[in-house]
Image (tube, helix red, strand yellow):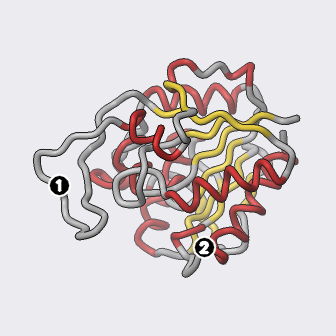
């Protein structure tokens, strides 16, 4: 049974991991006879969003690891505990927490940086020739992780694609049920809710992403 490290960024589309994408990834992994372990960095979120109003919850603070535990039903570990030898692949679901907590793309765009522990873990997995799956907004980290020329997709959003290109990435336009595969980098990306209009649409691309990641493992 192949084992996948699933990297979370909190809980909730606007300030953490996108819940549907995360759960669909978990379900798809199990349906493909793979196991997974959730990880998250033990850091404070950039901010907290009231998901009912869409407004910043002024004065409220939350921890990415603690919030990720909500999504993982408590079964999540500090990313600093992750050992690449224990895993065959790593997948990062989307959600604005990727652009706010795992990186600072939401603030700095093409001048972004990836959180050091996130960068170190994924680069170590890549260095061990283990495949990586990045979903939705997560491919904005691709050029920082893999370097110039890496192929990836966030779907068809022109501004986000331009930022990826400015960082040296090779953005490919993809439909919601498609994936972009960089075989040299062993990287699989899919747009999910960057394009999807429903959970069923998101599921089609995520299932393909999981299948391709596992086939490269």
Pointer 2 and pointer 1: residues touching (CB < 8 Å)? no
Q: Which residue is mark 1?
A: 57
Q: Position of residue 24 (x, y in %)?
A: 65, 59
Q: Where does the image place residue 3, in percent across and percent down from the top left?
A: 77, 34
Q: Residue at x 67, y 38 (%)?
A: 90
Residue 27 in the figure: left or right of residue 169: right
Q: Secondary structure at mark 1?
A: loop
Q: Residue furthest bottom?
A: 197
The percent position of residue 34, horizontal first and vertical second, equals 82, 42
Q: Is residue 69 above or below residue 171?
A: above
Task: Name the residue: 29% across, 34% down.
Answer: 44
The residue at the point 56 percent across, 39 percent down is: 7
Which image quarter: residue 130? top right
The residue drawn where x is 45% and y is 43% is 9
Q: Residue furthest front?
A: 73
Q: How many angstroms separate mark 2 from mark 1 (CA)?
A: 27 Å
Q: Can you identify the residue that label 2 sits on? A: 199
48 lies left or right of 76: left
């Amino acid at each position: 049974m192949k084992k996948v490290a699933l990297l979370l960024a909190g809980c909730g589309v606007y300030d953490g991991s996108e819940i549907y994408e995360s759960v669909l990834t978990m379900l798809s992994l199990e349906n493909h006879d793979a196991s997974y372990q959730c990880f998250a960095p033990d850091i404070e979120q950039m901010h907290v969003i009231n998901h009912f109003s869409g407004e910043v919850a002024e004065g409220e603070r939350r921890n990415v690891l603690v919030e990720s535990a909500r999504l993982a039903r408590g079964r999540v570990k500090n990313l600093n505990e992750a050992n690449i030898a224990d895993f065959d692949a790593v997948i990062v679901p989307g959600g604005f927490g990727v652009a706010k907590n795992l990186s600072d793309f939401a603030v700095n765009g093409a001048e972004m940086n990836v959180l050091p522990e996130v960068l170190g873990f994924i680069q170590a997995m890549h260095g061990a020739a283990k495949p990586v799956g990045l979903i939705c907004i997560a491919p904005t980290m691709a050029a920082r992780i893999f370097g110039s020329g890496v192929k990836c997709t966030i779907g068809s959003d022109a501004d986000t694609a331009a930022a990826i290109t400015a960082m040296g990435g090779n953005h490919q336009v993809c439909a919601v049920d498609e994936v972009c595969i960089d075989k040299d980098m062993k990287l699989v990306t899919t747009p999910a809710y960057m394009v999807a209009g429903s959970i069923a649409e998101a599921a089609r691309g995520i299932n393909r992403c999981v299948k391709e990641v596992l086939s490269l493992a």
